[in-house]
Image: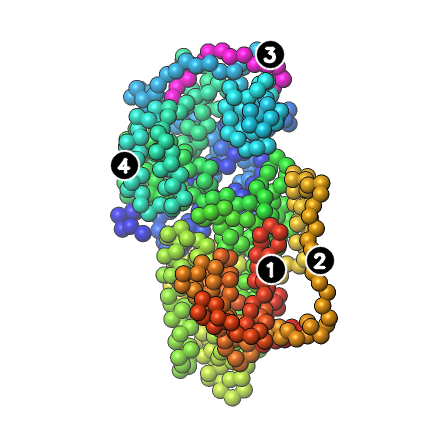
Amino acid sequence: MESDYKRILVTSALPYANGPLHLGHLAGAYLPADIYVRYQRLKKRDVVYICGSDEHGVPITIAAERKKVSPQSIVDEFHYRNKEAFAKFGIAFDYYGRTSAKIHHETSQEIFLRLHKKGIFKVKTEKQLFDKKANMFLADRYVKGTCPVCSNPEAYGDQCEKCGSTLSPSELINPKSAITGEPPEYRETKHWYLPLGDFQENVAKWIETRKHWKTNVLGQVKSWLSEGLADRAVTRDLSWGVPVPLEEAKGKVLYVWFDAPIGYISATKEWAVLQGRPDLWKLYWQDNHTKLVHFIGKDNIVFHCIMFPATLMELGDYVLPDNVPANEFLNLQGNKLSTSRNYAVWLDDYLQKFPVDPLRYYLTFNAPETKDADFTWQDFQQHNNSELADIMGNFINRTLTFAGKQFNGCIPERGVTDELDKQMLAILQDAPQKIGDLIEEYEFRRAIIALVDIGRAANKYFNDQEPWRSAKDNKSKCATTISICIHAVQTLALLMQPFMPESAARTWAMLGFTGNIQEIPWDTAGDCLLTPGAAFGPVSILFRKFEDTEIQPEIDRLRAISEAMFPAPATEKKEPETPKIKYEDFAKLDLRIARVLEAEKVEKADKLLKLLIQIGSEQRQIIAGVAKYYTPQEMIGKKIVVIANLEPAKIRGLESNGMLLAAEDEKGEFSVLMPEKDLDSGAKIR
């Protein structure tokens, strides 16, 4: 972190208060920000996390009309509902505001007037569709008609939901008002525009200094700049929103793209008032020693990287974002999310059925950091069971259970350390810096993989030291092994906090600590904070496995919706039947469980990994075409299924002595086959 920053201000995109939260929201803007903020708090830095409900705009008014209630009623319902859901999911905002608040209206109007007095805006008179029966100008979502691209008769004035084309109301064939169904007419109306083209040079120069930004963010920003920035309206004809504070603009409101980011400022003002220091917000927004970070989804990149910064530049006394680590989109079971068709996993619904931390873990592991990702219930189940339950939870449980039996539930005294002990202690000592550096660079996926790798290394250390043997013939060595294993549990608990805070606190309590785990500095996580002879607390299962009977109903629900959204063709090709074989043919295969000891990419081969595997007491090398789906780090420590009696073959000049088994479905989902239980390497499959 740069030394000239004294404080950090973090924001997440304001969610629309017109519906509940789903997993796409969490993966895009909220969970990454929460991990980052929790880490910075553990580093004892001055960090404030601001968010709130976006309560203006056409989606709010459309939701209100559908339910035959006022827009205020809609935003009141979903503001409090989403705020509660965020809290249950563990998103630890410092303040969660709302754009319908008086202070937000005042702040937005003040900023508009400052720009107006500087003569920044261009005023244009233009023709816009008007509904005579409703006596109102129609925003693009209030106009429906036939799509000029696919002939869908129910296309909206901004987009056709059938073919995905971006449209304008003037492009629709036979447009009609979505309110009354009447054909609209064009009438003149006046609007205020931000002339972004006038600011392009300054914005472009500033973007050139953002070399540390993610490539997907810079790519989109530079694409907009290369096309040339156009004037952008900051007002529109609506009855719901922040009123434009000009007499000649009576009846108009600020465009939601303009007022929503100002919500970060107004919410910080409200937070400052609660601190008893109303002017404190200025320190976070107007002092150059503030590091401002916006967490958003890719659909908000242009607003946070061009339009909002351009506005702040023209105001002249606000800090600009240090980074905007935008994520791509999260798809669902191979399809795009569709909230209108209920093709989503709603957070409220998830929280009623499953624990929080496995979802926090999986959404981080499967984060759409640089490209779209796909949430599948099967993959969620597999990663929970094989990594959280079998690696992390298993190590913590086996360590504390063993210590309970062999050392009366107390932390044993550590004796002389051998080479394996020192290697494990070095891993623990290096872990806070290694994982912290990844979090600082917004590489949360790699950070959580590194966390699980510590659990994987600790499990291996436990197995290699064989404390069940030393307990019989070398009690001092056994005590040292278990002391270091409990040290590893302590380190895992402390480093788990940004990712899985609830599980971290439970682990801390199992270790017998009574204080607040959040008070322990991040940098001390690798140190031993244990007192020999101290008793640890009651031990319980930290991560339970999810059964097929829990997961299958979720898969079935989405499949039913998917089939309705995308009906299968009338005639489908049948796959050719696989020829039958005799049992004697199958019995010739020697299928074994193997443990991956080492993994690395094969040079000049994008699809190949070179794996060193252990089958029982034997080690051998195999070449596997899985590099598109698994990194070398992900494969190390995995238990896999291999054909052990396959004749050796040369692949890219390297000997491959066996073959791993994997599966791929029709959607292209790929998975290496792994045993559900932690079977010994060499176990025979029959």
- Which mark is on residue 663? 1
Q: Which residue is mark 2?
A: 577
Dot 1, how many residues are within 10 Å of its Cα: few (below 14), some (14-19), or many (20+)? few
In magenta, the rendered stretch is 179-193
Give percent across and percent down for residue 174.
59, 18
Q: Amino acid at mark 3?
A: Lys
Determine the CA span between mark 3 and mark 4.
49 Å
Q: Is residue 363 magenta?
A: no
The quadrant where residue 155 appears: top right
Is residue 215 at least partly visible in the picture?
Answer: yes
**Is label 1 or label 4 in front?**
1
Q: Earlier in the sequence, mark 3 or mark 4?
A: 3
Residue at x 72% of width, y 72% of height: 583
Q: Which residue is mark 3?
A: 133
Of residues 614 and 406, the one drawn nearer to the viewer in this rendering: 614
Point out residue 184 in the picture as x, y percentages from the top left corner.
56, 14
State which mark lies toward you, 3 or 4.
Answer: 4
In the rendered image, is residue 513 in sight? no
- Chosen colour scheme: rainbow
Q: Secondary structure at mark 2?
A: loop
Q: CA distance from mark 3 to mark 1?
A: 60 Å
Of residues 632 and 456, the one drawn nearer to the viewer in this rendering: 632
Tell me: residue 179, above or below residue 82: above
Residue 123, given in percent of the width and then of the height, sits at: 37, 16
Which residue type carries mark 2?
Answer: Glu
Q: Secondary structure at mark 3?
A: loop
Of callouts 3 and 1, which one flags the residue occurring earlier in the amino acid sequence?
3
Q: Given contact means CB atoms under 8 Å apart, are the residues at marks 2 and 4 in contact?
A: no
Query: Who's the residue at 37% across and 31% down the image?
Result: 227
Q: Quadrant of the C terminus?
A: bottom right
Circle 1: residue type = Ala
